[in-house]
Amino acid sequence: MAAAPLAVFKLWLDDYVRREGAFEVQAAANHAVGLAERRLGMTIDELDKVAARGVASCRNDHLEVLRSANFSASPVKEFSIIGPDGRTLCSDLGAAPGERAVVASGPIAGRADAALELVQVGSRQERFLRLRRPTITGANVLAALLPPDLLLTPISAAGGPVLSQTQMRLAGGAIVGEAGPAALPTESFVASARSERFGLSVMVLLPRSVKFRQHQDLESIGYMIAGAMALLLFGFAALRPRRTRDNPVVEIEKALKAGEFVPYYQPVIDITTARIRGAEVLMRWRKPDGTIIPPGHFIPLAESSGLIAEMMRHLMRAVRDEMGDAVIDRPFLRFGFNLSACHFRDDSIVADVREIFEGSTIRLAQLVLELTERHPLDNLTSARRVIAALQGLGVKVAIDDVGAGHSGLSYILKLGVDIIKIDKIFIDALGHDSNSTTIIETLMDLARNLRMDVIAEGVENFEQVVALRERGIRAAQGYVFAPPLPGSAFLQLIEATDPVASVQEATLPARRPLALPLAPPLGPRAA
Ligand code: G
Ligand code: G
Ligand code: MN
């Protein structure tokens, strides 16, 4: 895949050079034919003028006309008079010119009287083009000799040396002349053009290597860009899967640094007063695109990788900062955090909690740390010590998911916790299943005797609320009241149901001014 940009660039460059090369040789061929037609046209006009002035012999005054014609018609080497036998009688340069052998001859379109010839001149057999037309008066012929070089002026687009080869032929195929490097390149761009009027054709060849050399800068820049793209693609291909698929731990670490783990709050309701007593804090991974990922997808990995400790510290600080103001006027609110088994191995959680909340508006007595029964603890003794240390700070400790795990009543009896949270399994069975009902009643008795609070979890309808209240349970959470809410929504909920003004009138005469507009008071709160 990384080679793709290179291959694509190579194809593009090949195609670009091919198109440019083809265009260039065609233009050169057209240019050569155009030049030849103009110069041959001028020359035949000049011959016509000379003929019109009655020039027909080697007489001195006739030669004088030929000389002045040669002066004005620049591409012409000489004007001459040819006898009926084909021998050159004289030229504007003087009498008795050398031998001229006709190699080939062709007609001129629209001029039945005239012709274009290829002749060899002198001992060096130099090749010339010769235009001829009859004189008006006699049997002699007027002729003009043109060096083919003048018709084959090679052009170089870049202004450097001429690298293309140009070849001119008469209609019959005889070579009139060649220009440019002599050696024929094996691989070339080729184009040809024809002059219908004079029966001439021009072929231009340009070695492919020349064109590619001209684009070396472009080529090396292109290869650099394509190489960089290939590297980028390679980087994406090689690194991305490692980060997202092979190493999700790195993803979690990055998300932690970016502050993507945020607290959600599920209200805990006092079902005897319908007031909010606090919330269970549930972690959510809020991705930059707004996606919310539930804890089931990342908590197990966070726990096994050891990242959970730092994540919990981050979560606690977030709750402290987010809820700090609301708590000033509502000191009864409690916030529960879900701890992992690893938190109960040593007392670092004790130091963390103290460091994070000491001196904040959230008192340590407002914290509930939940220990789930779902996963077994590896060391009950150290867990007991950590729990006692937390309680020493005034923090409450709860056993979570009671009934869902395998510990039976042993955790409740051995760990000395403050709160038991009854699992949704029992709440669902309440009223339908007599065993569940019995277990709940047993738990209630136990809680009363051990002076523990009870919270019912996963309460989804009002029959369950009524059934729980009948059995003396005061606190409950569940979808019937509210799902886990983002911080802003939870703040709005407590402001709407527990406006600060009511607390103000009833209990606290002087307090700091509030930034929030005051909602109408609901009347004094029950003590
Ligand atoms: O919030 P949700 O509704 O999906 O919670 C699913 C489970 O994820 C909870 O029962 C709890 O065990 C776990 N969980 C949620 N938040 C936290 C957290 O902050 N820390 C730990 N360790 N577990 C959490
Ligand atoms: O830590 P714990 O397992 O107790 O976390 C509570 C879990 O139960 C969270 O995943 C929360 O989203 C979920 N939950 C809270 N209330 C309800 C409810 O009424 N019904 C159901 N099915 N799940 C709930
Ligand atoms: Mn919980």
Image: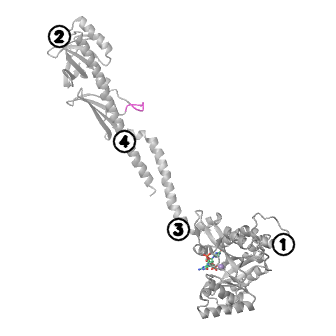
At label 1, counting other C-alpha atoms closer than 10 Å, the crowd grade (few under 14, some 14-19, many 20 or more) is: few
Mark 2 or mark 4, which is nearer to you?
Answer: 2
Across and down, in percent, residue 337 comes to 69, 76
- Magenta stretch in the rendered image: 156-162
Q: Residue at x 82, y 72 (%)?
A: 505
Inspect the magenta stretch and tell me whether residue 227 lies in it.
Answer: no
| Tag of residue 245 | 3
Q: Nearer the viewer, residue 456 or 260?
A: 456
| Tag of residue 19 | 4
| Tag of residue 508 | 1
At label 2, counting other C-alpha atoms closer than 10 Å, the crowd grade (few under 14, some 14-19, many 20 or more) is: few
Q: Amino acid at mark 3?
A: Arg
Mark 3 or mark 2, which is nearer to you?
Answer: 2
Decide: is 266 above or below 438: above
Q: Are marks 1 and 3 in contact (CB under 8 Å)?
A: no
- The answer to which image quadrant residue 360 occupies is bottom right
